[in-house]
Image (tube, grey):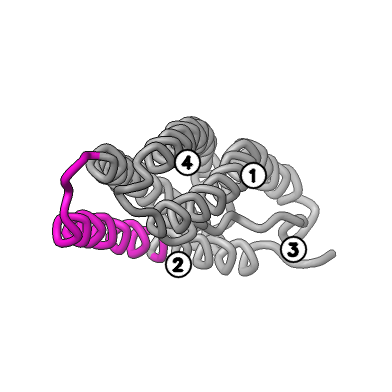
């Protein structure tokens, strides 16, 4: 179970360089990007909470794996804690999903700006919108794969407290968790790459006054 962490869009936006006649369009673009960043604030909060929960759950998991079936009462107690952490993580994941959906809706407002932005910047704004939407789609995939990971972890927690389970069976269950976790990490990596692209495109459009 690895730490689940995703990048977010960096802040500190400034206006596009350009002549004063383009100021209103520049401000519209800045306002839309500001709304996107604002919408993602709840995502960042949920992500921070989720990361803390994962660390606590990992500690409990490590302690669980040191127990034997002769200590079944302690096993069941720790499994209960792990299941509680898991449910709390899914709650934070749901908050992330809602925040990113709201940010995606704000990103759709870029369409109106694309129609008005100067030709020199049009392709860059189009590319930024495309990359943003790709990023939100990847987050949807993260939610799907992470939910599947949680389901597999829940099954592991239920099985580990079953009397008579063998070491071989436990290893198979751990392998199943690790395989799904690898899938989650790969999608997160792609998401982070898209975030870097968005920030790079933003830098190309926005310069210091």
- How crowded pointer 4 is (Cα within 10 Å; few <14, some 14-19, many 20+) is rated as few
Using the image as rendered, state which of residue 85 and residue 63 is in the foreground.
63
At mark 4, the secondary structure is helix
What's the distance in space between the residues labelled 2 and 4, CA to CA?
23 Å
- In the image, taking residue 113 as reference, residue 190 lies left or right, namely left
Question: In this rendering, which labeled residue sits more in front, label 4 or label 1?
Answer: 1
Residue drawn 45% across the image and 67% down it:
193
Question: In this rendering, which labeled residue sits more in front, label 2 or label 3?
Answer: 2
- How crowded pointer 1 is (Cα within 10 Å; few <14, some 14-19, many 20+) is rated as many
| Mark closer to the chain start, 2 or 1 | 1
Label 2 sits on residue = 193
At mark 2, the secondary structure is helix
- How crowded pointer 3 is (Cα within 10 Å; few <14, some 14-19, many 20+) is rated as some
Residue drawn 77% across the image and 59% down it:
19
Q: Position of residue 177 (x, y in %)?
A: 27, 55
What's the distance in space between the residues labelled 2 and 3, CA to CA?
26 Å
- In the image, taking residue 26 as reference, residue 67 lies left or right, namely left
Residue drawn 71% across the image and 51% down it:
22
| Boundaries of the magenta span | 162-189
Label 3 sits on residue = 17
Q: Quadrant of residue 161?
A: top left
Q: Position of residue 63 (x, y in %)?
A: 47, 55
What's the distance in space between the residues labelled 4 and 1, CA to CA?
17 Å
Cβ–Cβ below 8 Å for labels 1 and 3? no
Label 1 sits on residue = 37
- In the image, taking residue 22 as reference, residue 182 lies left or right, namely left
What's the distance in space between the residues labelled 3 and 4, CA to CA?
20 Å
């Amino acid at each position: 179970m690895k730490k689940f962490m995703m990048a977010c869009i960096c802040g500190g936006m400034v206006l596009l360089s350009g002549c004063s006649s383009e100021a209103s369009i520049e401000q519209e673009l800045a306002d839309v990007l500001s709304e996107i960043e604002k919408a993602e604030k709840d995502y960042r909060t949920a992500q921070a909470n989720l990361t803390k929960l994962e660390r606590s759950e990992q500690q409990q998991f490590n302690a669980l794996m040191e127990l034997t079936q002769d200590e079944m009462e302690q096993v069941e107690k720790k499994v209960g804690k792990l299941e509680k952490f898991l449910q709390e993580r899914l709650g934070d994941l749901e908050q992330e999903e809602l925040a990113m959906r709201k940010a995606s809706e704000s990103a759709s407002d870029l369409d109106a700006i694309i129609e008005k932005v100067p030709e020199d910047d049009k392709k860059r704004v189009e590319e930024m919108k495309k990359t943003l939407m790709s990023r939100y789609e990847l987050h949807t995939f993260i939610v799907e794969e992470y939910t599947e990971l949680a389901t597999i972890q829940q099954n592991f927690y239920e099985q580990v407290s079953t009397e008579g389970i063998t070491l071989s069976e436990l290893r198979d269950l751990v392998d199943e968790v690790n395989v799904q976790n690898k899938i989650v990490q790969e999608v997160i990596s792609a998401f982070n790459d898209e975030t870097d692209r968005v920030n790079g495109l933003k830098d190309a459009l926005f310069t210091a006054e």
